[in-house]
Amino acid sequence: MKEEGFQKRSEEKLVKKSYNCGKCNDTGWILAPQEHSAPIAISCSCRELDRIKTDWERSGIKTEQSNLTFSNFCIWNESSGRAKDIALAYYKDFNSIRRTRKNSILFCGQVGSGKSHLSIALALNFLRKNVKVVYMPYRDAIMKIKQNIMDDEYYQKIISKYQLAEVLLIDDLFKGKISESDISIIFEILNYRYLNNLPIIVSTECVVDKLLYIDEAIGSRIYEMSKDYIMEIGKGKENNYRLR
Ligand SMILES: Nc1ncnc2c1ncn2[C@@H]1O[C@H](COP(=O)(O)OP(=O)(O)OP(=O)(O)O)[C@@H](O)[C@H]1O
Ligand SMILES: [Mg+2]
Ligand SMILES: [Zn+2]
């Protein structure tokens, strides 16, 4: 009896020590049999998942944001339907427009209408397609940059991360009080991307007129870049998903 118990426990141990990926035994490779030659090694799908996970961590998107997908975005009124259509059209067109000036998308207007949700849904899809997105949560990012404005090296490093990203997602742009230095930091990032035709995804409570009013140089660049994919969500509680 004692013996049996011991055997059972060591079997359990063996099972626990098994591989994360049963397909490739964690080697990353699978041998694919060939009809007329020796088997060839092909990359296992778990490697792809690892890559997505790493890219995701690098992007700055948090785990709790992983449920902000297109399939979790329901069409519950006219404007949510339109917003989703524009987001999906942008995703579909991305490869053919990405190197042009008009390669960006803007979700603006009503609070709680799903602007951040759709922006992140796009980012998650891009990451899956190996397009490296960098997530810039506007308020936190700008605060961090300003706290380190005296540290030249850090400042340059963080600004270049946002300037050079394959796709930059600026979430909740101009949320809260805006100072001159906020504007000049955003301009530095945005103008670089504008001049180099690098795409942005922007979510903001400010409608286009408000963006232009806050800073015409910034507003007009965002407008030009996202001209073909602007979703302005009408202000009104009827468009606030949180209050539905
Ligand atoms: N159509 C929708 N289907 C499912 N969930 C939604 C939808 N619209 C919004 N939500 C959810 O409602 C909450 C608010 O949405 P979100 O943060 O995207 O709004 P927002 O427009 O960015 O608001 P804010 O202006 O306050 O930043 C989120 O939890 C989001 O997942
Ligand atoms: Mg938001
Ligand atoms: Zn594997």
Image: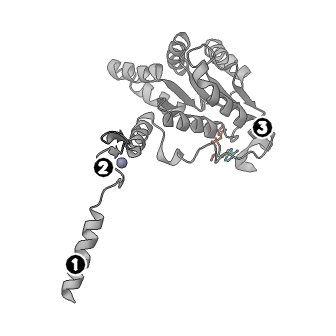
Asked if the residue under mark 1 is in contact with the one under mark 2, i.e. CB atoms within 8 Å, the reply is no
Determine whether 9 is above or below 202 in the image.
below
Q: Is residue 91 visible?
A: yes
The mark lying in front, picked from 3 and 1, is 1
Q: Amino acid at mark 2?
A: Asp
Using the rendered view, name the quadrant where residue 86 is placed: top right
How crowded is the residue under tag 1: few (<14 C-alpha within 10 Å), some, or many (20+)? few
Earlier along the polypeptide chain: callout 2 or callout 3?
2
| Pointer 1 residue | 7
Task: Identify whether 168 is placed above or below 236.
Answer: above
Residue beneath the point at 22% across and 73% down: 10
Label 2: which secondary element: loop
What SS does tag 1 mark?
helix
Q: Position of residue 42 (x, y in %)?
A: 36, 40
Question: Does residue 176 appear to the left or right of 44 in the view shown?
Answer: right
Quadrant of the picture in which ligand 1 is shown: top right
The residues bearing labels 2 and 3 have C-alpha atoms spaced at a distance of: 46 Å
Q: Which residue is mark 2?
A: 26
Q: Is mark 2 within 8 Å of ligand 3?
A: yes
